[in-house]
Amino acid sequence: MVELIEVLKNITLKMNKLNIKWGFVGTVNHFLQGVEINPKDIDIVISFNDFEKVKNAFLNLNIKITLNEKFQEITFKLDKFNVQICADFKNTEHFKKRFENENIKILNLEGIKFPVFNLKYEIECYLIEGRNEKANKLIEFIKN
């Protein structure tokens, strides 16, 4: 896990310099908040309007850009981890509220500010997307 933490630190320092709204989601988010899980990849959500700024920040890496009618995505590999930075076009009221204060929080680890999504908000997202198994695992974690 030391390798993962170092990769997350590097990404976080670079992203925080951009002065944008962003956050870790998925298994890395769960891991950072204490869920016992071994993340295989790193998922990040950004605002659609910040896509170009983020893309330019990672141009020195071998990045792949995906653009379609549903989302914009930057993918690359850091050490052994696949990194996915996604800006989606979901315009539902729920997803528009993604970066509101109650949905995102900052974890201060070793002096670095890691933005993560509130697990309750992530549960809501999983349920909207029909990913009930993931939602139920987080519900169980919060209960304990």
Image: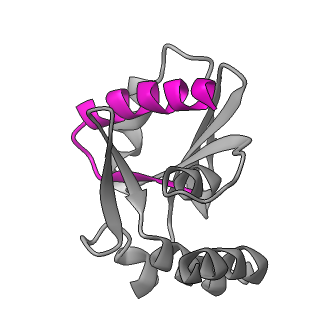
Q: Is residue 101 left or right of residue 42?
A: left
Q: Is residue 104 left or right of residue 43?
A: left
The answer to which of 12 and 35 lies nearer the viewer is: 35
Task: Point out residue 2 in the picture as x, y percentages from the top left corner.
Answer: 59, 26
Name the residue rendered at 53%, 26% in the picture. Answer: 7
Count of marks, rendered view:
0
Q: Quadrant of residue 70?
A: bottom right
Residue 125 seen in this snapshot: yes
Picture layout, residue 88 above or below residue 31? below
Q: Is residue 99 magenta?
A: no
The answer to which of 142 and 22 lies nearer the viewer is: 142
Name the residue rendered at 26%, 46% in the picture. Answer: 20
Task: Point out residue 75 in the picture as x, y percentages from the top left corner.
Answer: 63, 35
- Name the chief secondary structure element in magenta: helix
Name the residue rendered at 24%, 70% in the picture. Answer: 101
Q: Is residue 4 left or right of residue 59?
A: right
Q: Is residue 12 magenta?
A: yes
Task: Point out residue 42 in the picture as x, y percentages from the top left corner.
Answer: 61, 42
The answer to which of 23 and 89 lies nearer the viewer is: 23
Q: Which residues are magenta?
A: 1-25
Question: Which quadrant of the figure contains the N terminus?
Answer: top right
Which residue reaches farthest top? 60
Q: Quadrant of residue 40?
A: top right
Q: Quadrant of residue 117?
A: bottom left
Picture layout, residue 78 above or below residue 25? above
Task: Point out residue 84 in the picture as x, y percentages from the top left corner.
Answer: 61, 42
Question: Which quadrant of the figure contains the C terminus?
Answer: bottom right
Residue 68 seen in this snapshot: no
Name the residue rendered at 60%, 31% in the picture. Answer: 4
Which residue reaches farthest front? 144
Picture layout, residue 128 above or below residue 18? below
